[in-house]
Amino acid sequence: MKTIIEPFRIKSVEPIRLTRRDERERYLAATGYNLFGLHADDVLIDLLTDSGTGAMSSMQWAAVMSGDESYAGSPSFYRFEAAVKHLMPFKHVIPTHQGRAAEAILFSVFGGEGRRIPSNTHFDTTRGNLEASGAFGDDLVIAEGRDPRAEHPFKGNMDLGLLEDYLGRHGDAVPLVMLTITNNAGGGQPVSLANIRAVAELAHRFGKPFFIDGCRFAENAWFIKTREPGQAQRSIEDIVRDCFGVADGMTMSAKKDAFGNIGGWIAVNDDVVAERSRQHLIRTEGFPTYGGLAGRDLEALAQGLREIVDEDYLRYRIRTNAYIVEQLDAMGIPVVKPAGGHAVFIDARAWLDHIAPLQYPGQALAVALYELAGIRSCEIGTVMFGSQPDGSERPAAMDLVRLAFPRRTYTQSHADYVIEAFGELAATKDRLGGYRIVSQPQRMRHFTCRFEKIGA
Ligand SMILES: *Cc1c(COP(=O)(O)O)cnc(C)c1O
């Protein structure tokens, strides 16, 4: 059979509330056109993020019931720890309430004034945390990774020439080398196993620890299996173990590829780094055998980690995005190709080329999608990345709109509805205008800033 089906059936459903266009315009105006400000029950199809929004399995819900809430030494922690170590062979596994807490701990150890930290592309919370420590982040993804239309099987790869040059130039200022798999801010694009190994080798040659931001490790492994020569016959678990086997540590948001609604961890081999991390953890998150999570959360993650490496799931997961990308591409809508792992990215700067980057074409598209069809998406562009540490502003590398798919949550008819909405927008997009920001916080402004329509 050629049809790739959702490899599950539905045991429990949540109703979606249908809304009218005039209602949606009112809701959005009240939030200052910031989609993060909407009430979720005013959203029809919520593609804001794939973070913590997935459906847990019946096995995960069953595991929740066996959660042990002991403050110290809960058996739930040991089951969680074993599930992580089964895939990621690090000596110390330290749970946190989500990924950014792991990042805050990482940069409390490795960050600081004057430090420079390279990655393929730092995600927004990673950048926010390292900058808050006084450090500076640099994105060294390959040139194809910056070009929405360049076809390359591993557009998330680090540019090895740039990295070598960087390590030579900044030497002592570099406390560690990072790599994000898949490269979320760069379109959910994968990193090859060969690139992961080469980055590790370079980092170690310069005496630097190598850390992986592993949020979407299973999706990345699926791309390695299906695109990298020599990997097709290998199991996802083996590929995952190879990826992390060359690293000195990792940070993780378990709200992504662990099927969790909440959770994260930092894992390291070095005993001193682990000890300093645990000290920070105790001050900010909790005791090291729960780290800001309930025992039942740890149980859900342990089971989720067993399910996420299932090949039938990953085949369906990756196909969902490829299907939408193919349809939008056929309509002439500029999309990031090939399709990423967790999301579809529309090149709003190219599609709405009458809106200048500093008038936020991505925001204009995200607003239009919600007003027209009740679909919530997320701008990944100048709103998210354009604000500079000195308070100035400049266009981000790309102005993308991300449609991120929650795991196991929506079906193919939802995907078809999204495709139809883009067909409608194509007819009227030239009339969309830009936006200006009227209030914003100092860091990570996209979550809470307010906009005005230009010319309205
Ligand atoms: C989501 C994400 C994070 C942060 O994790 P949270 O659980 O949202 O705090 C870090 N890096 C990447 C690549 C992510 O996708």
Image (tube, grey):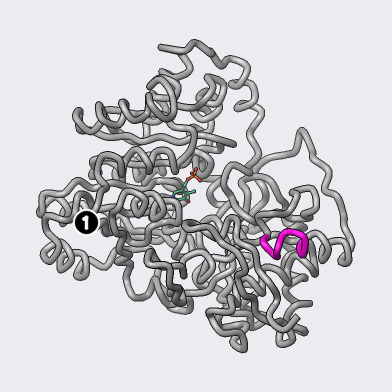
**Image position of 70 with respect to 456: above or below:** above
Q: Is residue 154 visible?
A: no
For the residue pair 220 and 300, the one nearer the viewer reads as: 300
Q: Is residue 119 left or right of residue 420?
A: left
Using residue 373 as the reference point, say whether residue 196 is left or right of it.
Answer: left
Task: Choose between 9 and 27: the one closer to the eye.
Answer: 27
- Residue 104 relative to residue 21: left or right: left
Residue drawn where x is 53% and y is 57% of the image: 441
Residue numbers of the magenta segment? 28-34
| Magenta highlight on residue 65 | no
Q: Position of residue 394 (x, y in %)?
A: 44, 76
Q: Position of residue 13 (x, y in %)?
A: 79, 38
Instruction: Tell me if residue 374 comes above or below residue 111 in the rendering.
Output: below
Query: Which residue is the site of mark 1?
Result: 114
| The one of 408 and 20 positioned closer to us in this rendering | 20
Disc 1 is placed on an element classified as loop
